[in-house]
Structures are given as structure tokens and as C-alpha cells.
């Protein structure tokens, strides 16, 4: 049982999440097969290239209703063909679960898609805050030349449905066209 005054057990400074049980994961280009439209360009790239890394703090066991997780993602700049480096993207397995994303540094775009496959995007940058509604898939693209850092908080019973996106993709892709990001 906790009593008295202690130091915070976790640190979330501008761009670092650390502490006991903070989990780390990473995705390299090789882990992102079939994610990008231009498979030929993907084939020609070094599969060891780091695309993004994630630190997350998941206190309650996955599936616990009412608890919260948080994480921070570092998404590297780069493109596969004309398409910006991006996260795999997912729906929540429990479709009613929502999420907050917020921009820490760098420049990017949060790409959202509802179950009718309508796609829209919100610009991300330092201090932007994004509410991801129920039943909306989400992925982030780095549209800048610096690393894009963003944080997230989501319910511990959300779960990740990557399969639907792997099978059906997003209805639109964020490509660089004439030097600018466009949803195509
Ligand atoms: C978890 C949260 C983020 C993402 C991370 C990587 O619910 O949305 O921590 O896991 O940004 O994206 P993805 O789509 O590969 O999980
Ligand atoms: Zn999510």
C-alpha cells in the first residue's frame, strides 16, 4: 500500500517515456511489407532501415476495462516511392475504444478512416492534440525532414486490429505531389 510523498515513478519529459516496465518495440522497413503502394521501391530499399520505434507504458494487463495506456512513437522521415514513411495503422479491436494522439515534435499527418472507408487527415506538429473517435482507423505519416515524435493514450481494452488494414488498406494514401502532401 502506498503512503506519503514519493517521486514520480514515471517520466514523460518533452520526448522521452521511461520507467519500470516501459516496453520498447520497433518497426523496420522489412516489417512493413505490403504497407506501401510502391512495392518496387520498397524492394529496392534496405530492409534494415528503421521506420519507427515505440515506447509504451501498459500497467494493467491487456484487456482490462477502464485502465489506460500511453506511448510515444518516433517516426523517421523518408519515403517509399512518393509515399511518406508511416505507421502500419490499425482499428481498435474493440471498435468503441477511442484514443488521443498529440504532436511533440516534427511534422506529420494523422490519417483517419471510418468503417465506410471515408478518409481524412489532420496535420500534426508540436502541441497538436487529436481525438480519435470510436470505429476510426488511424495511422501517422511523417511529412517532414526531421523525426516526428507523437504521444498517444488509449484504453487497455482497445486491442489492435492490424488484420483489417493489412487486408483492405486505407482508401487513400498520403503521397508527396509537387513537393506537398496530398491524400490520393
Ligand atoms: C497504440 C498507439 C500507438 C501506435 C504506434 C505505432 O494504440 O496507437 O502507440 O501503436 O504509433 O502505430 P501502429 O499502427 O503500428 O500500432
Ligand atoms: Zn490506436
Image (cartoon, rainbow, N blue to C red):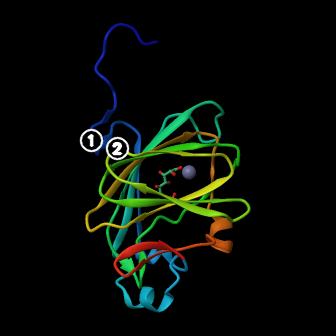
Residues at marks 2 and 1, CA–CA distance in whole angstroms: 11 Å
Residue at 31% over, 66% down? 144
Instruction: Say if 59 sits above or below 158 in the image.
Output: above
Give yes or no for contact between labels 2 and 1 (Cβ–Cβ under 8 Å): no
The residue that label 1 is drawn on is: 14
Closer-to-camera residue (38/121): 121
Q: Is mark 1 on a helix, strand or loop?
A: loop
Q: How crowded is mark 2: few (under 14 residues within 10 Å), some or many (20 or more)?
A: few
Q: Which image quadrant is residue 167 in?
A: bottom right
Horizontal relation, residue 31 to residue 163: left or right: left
The image quadrant where one finds the C terminus is bottom right
Instruction: Say if 88 sits above or below 18 in the image.
Output: below
Label annotation for residue 152: none
Q: Where is residue 172 in the image (x, y as percent from the top left)?
A: 58, 72
Q: Earlier in the sequence, mark 2 or mark 1?
A: 1
Between label 2 and label 1, give the one nearer the viewer: 2
Horizontal relation, residue 44 to residue 147: left or right: right
The residue that label 2 is drawn on is: 127
Q: What element carries label 2?
A: loop
Instruction: Say if 165 sits above or below 58 in the image.
Output: below
Horizontal relation, residue 92 to residue 47: left or right: right
Amino acid at each position: 500500500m502506498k503512503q506519503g510523498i514519493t517521486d514520480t515513478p514515471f517520466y514523460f519529459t518533452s520526448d522521452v517515456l521511461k520507467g519500470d516496465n516501459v516496453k520498447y518495440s520497433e518497426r523496420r522497413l522489412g516489417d512493413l511489407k505490403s504497407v506501401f503502394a510502391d512495392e518496387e521501391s520498397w524492394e529496392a530499399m534496405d530492409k534494415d532501415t528503421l521506420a519507427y520505434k515505440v515506447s509504451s507504458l501498459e500497467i494493467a494487463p491487456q484487456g482490462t476495462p477502464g485502465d489506460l495506456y500511453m506511448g510515444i512513437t518516433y517516426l523517421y522521415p523518408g519515403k517509399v516511392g512518393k509515399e511518406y514513411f508511416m505507421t502500419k495503422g490499425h482499428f481498435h479491436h474493440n471498435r468503441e475504444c477511442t484514443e488521443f494522439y498529440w504532436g511533440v515534435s516534427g511534422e506529420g499527418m494523422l490519417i483517419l478512416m471510418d468503417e465506410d472507408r471515408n478518409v481524412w487527415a489532420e496535420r500534426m506538429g508540436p502541441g497538436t492534440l487529436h481525438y480519435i473517435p470510436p470505429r476510426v482507423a488511424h495511422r501517422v505519416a511523417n511529412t517532414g525532414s526531421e523525426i516526428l515524435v507523437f504521444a498517444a493514450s488509449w484504453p487497455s481494452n482497445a486491442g489492435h486490429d492490424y488484420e483489417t488494414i493489412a487486408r483492405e488498406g486505407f482508401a487513400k494514401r498520403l503521397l508527396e505531389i509537387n513537393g506537398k502532401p496530398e491524400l490520393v
